[in-house]
Amino acid sequence: MQRLLNPSEAARIRERLHDNGLLQTCQRVWPDRQAIITSFAACAEDIFCEVAWLVDELIETDRDSDAISLTKGLWTTVTNHISSWAGQVSLTDRYLAVSTVFRIVATAFSLHWESYYSDRLREALLDVENEKMPAPKDLYYLRQGQRQQEELLMSIASCSELLSEWVNEYIDNPNLWLTEEIDMALNPQPNIKPPKPESRKADKKPFAPDTYRDTFTYWPDGMSKEERDIRLKLAFSRMRGTLIHRDTHYDTFEALLNGKPLDVKIVWIGTNSQLRGLFNQLVTKNKLVKKPTGGLNQILTARFKKENGTPFTSNEIKNAGSTGDMSVVNDVVSYLAPASATTEDLEIQLSRILTEEQERADMMGKKDGKYQRYSPKGTNVSATPNQHTRTTKRKKQ
């Protein structure tokens, strides 16, 4: 936005987006901030429009772009928007408004499960905010500025529950862009019943077959092929029969972490939280595994299926609780994490595990514990990933 909303426009935004957690946060945070601003008067919906614009710009931008340069440029854009709200906006008031916008977005992103938002973008937003803080005239103004920022942080922190629910729903299960919702509220079609909003999922281009069949890649920097192969076998032995079906072929499991196209789904027998927890640790927390383009939840639904053969949904993985034995997950992560152990030690450990597994299988009269060749039979699937990509930017006003 580059102008202040009039009362009727603000009312239309409130009516259309009354249950939006981001708007509710702006409505709670902005009144106290406005009370210390003297050069212009804006409503919470004005701030919400700027927050919505910033969120959509950040989500749409290529993830390979430099986060610091990106956020500096967006700081300048939001500053220009707010500077146009009144004839002369003071430097201090301009900072108070723009920092409010950036701090709300940074807090919302910090609550998202994916590290790209919770770490990379959040840190870049906060770094730019700190860098742009006006130099205090004296100790009094320094303490005053610090107090104002502390009050802002406390106000936004009280909205964490609202922001957490909103940010995960908005990024992982997109419908309309916020900027599109605002445009619809400000420009309703007169005397025509508005059509049912078209989901922005329908605008997304599906991945090419070779893309959506791509798998995770496990090969930490500096790890030899020999060590990598042993660690994969250790992880497979720990997961087989506890997290993945005992009949899973080792070659299928290895292909899952080789970054190569995989036409079959692995049968997951663990809990939903174990599935999400394992790959969240491998991909996001420990960064041992790289994932193909797309949201992690959607990729997992394309790589795994339930024991009864039915597919997972993205929501089932995203909303998984904390049930299940996470010690199994932690063991798998420890097997895949680089350590000081020698190759010989790893081979001894693997040999011991395989011997114990074979003994258990013999006692139970089940199939042997040896690895089986990967030979899928009629299990090809067509994944339906849901990439969050806006096809067209909203027009700059």
Image (tube, rainbow, N blue to C red):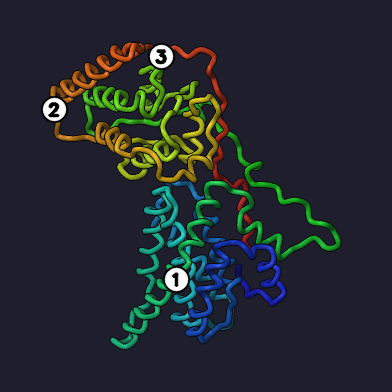
Amino acid at the residue labelled 2: Thr
x 54%, y 30%: residue = 311
State the SS at label 3.
loop
The image shows residue 44 at horizontal and vertical percentages of 58, 73
Please say if the residues under marks 2 and 1 sit with CB atoms less than 8 Å apart.
Answer: no
Give above or below for 254 relative to 371. below
Badge 1, how many Cα within 10 Å: few under 14, some, many 20+? many
Q: Which of 67 and 233 is in front in this view?
A: 233
Q: Can residue 211 be seen in this view?
A: no
* Separation (CA) of disc 3 from disc 1: 55 Å
Q: Mark 3 points at which residue?
A: 374
Q: Which mark is residue 99?
A: 1
Q: Where is residue 66 in the image (x, y as percent from the top left)?
A: 40, 52
Classify mark 1: helix, strand or loop: helix
Amino acid type for the residue under numbered disc 3: Tyr
| Number of residues whose C-alpha sits closer than 10 Å to that of mark 2, classed few (under 14), some (14–19) or many (20 or more) | few
Q: Which numbered disc covers residue 66?
A: none
Mark 2 / mark 3, whichever is N-terminal: 2
Query: Residue, x 53% and y 34% (percent of image)?
Result: 312
